[in-house]
Image (tube, rainbow, N blue to C red):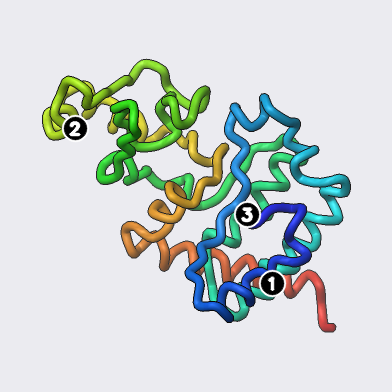
Amino acid sequence: MLCLWNSDCFENLEQITIKYGVSHRITAQVFYPIVDRLKNANELMGATPVKALNELEKYVENRQKVRFDPFLSMIPGYYRSLLEQSDFDYPVFLKRCPIPLYYVNIIENGEIFPCPGVDSSLYPGTGNKRFKFSCKNNGIQSIVSGKSYGEMQNYLIECQKCKKYLASCYIRPRIHFPLGNLLTLREIYHSLDQQATARKGPR
């Protein structure tokens, strides 16, 4: 989990996983409403968040030169939006979301939902409270093929709730599926990177 308080040592942590052959996936600390209630987001991000954000941006920039990861490129902007209390905007959110059409969470209490766009026991306070589905007394197939579930899917295609909660399990599929999304975002990222390099001037 790539956070502002560990960005200065993340490269070493990654090398340890490589050394011991441990699979790893980079994600961000996600500030769901329940986390905000437990502790202030700025406190969680460290005593000197602006300095830490600069360190994080350096790490992401260097790592992208080795192996491009479009999700990783979003993490600094996500933390910056939290610090500045501004809207987190990114090209992937301009596209209709495919997640509710092929992804579903089924948790131990029987609840069925696709993402944080729907309020649930897993993500309390994140989304629409209208849609509630449970497989305790109904089959999963009958639920996901029902009219109400279809209405929920249509609502979530445009909801954009997930940009407030940068969880990789929902954002990565939005980037990689369909393949055209990944190719488009790769071009956008490299264009932004070239613009940033041009602004810095020769080293």
- Image quarter hosting the N terminus: bottom right
Q: Secondary structure at mark 2?
A: helix
Direction from residue 46 to residue 31 in the image, left or right: left
Give residue 30's quadrant in the image.
Answer: top right
Q: Are marks 3 and 2 in contact (CB under 8 Å)?
A: no
Mark 1 or mark 3: name the one nearer the start of the chain.
1
Q: Tag 1: Cα neighbours inside 10 Å, few (<14), some, or many (≥20)? A: some
How far apart in space, not on screen, are marks 3 and 2 (Cα)? 32 Å
* Up-down relation of residue 105 to residue 53 (above or below): above
Mark 2 or mark 1: name the one nearer the start of the chain.
1
Could you tell me the amino acid type at mark 1? Glu
Could you tell me the amino acid type at mark 2? Val
User: Could you tell me residue 155's position as x and y percent?
Assistant: 34, 28
The dot on residue 144 is 2
Along the viewing direction, whichever of 164 and 106 lies nearer the viewer:
106
Q: Tag 2: Cα neighbours inside 10 Å, few (<14), some, or many (≥20)? A: some
**Which residue is identified by label 1?**
11
**Which residue is identified by label 3?**
75
Give residue 9's quadrant in the image.
Answer: bottom right
Mark 3 or mark 2: name the one nearer the start of the chain.
3
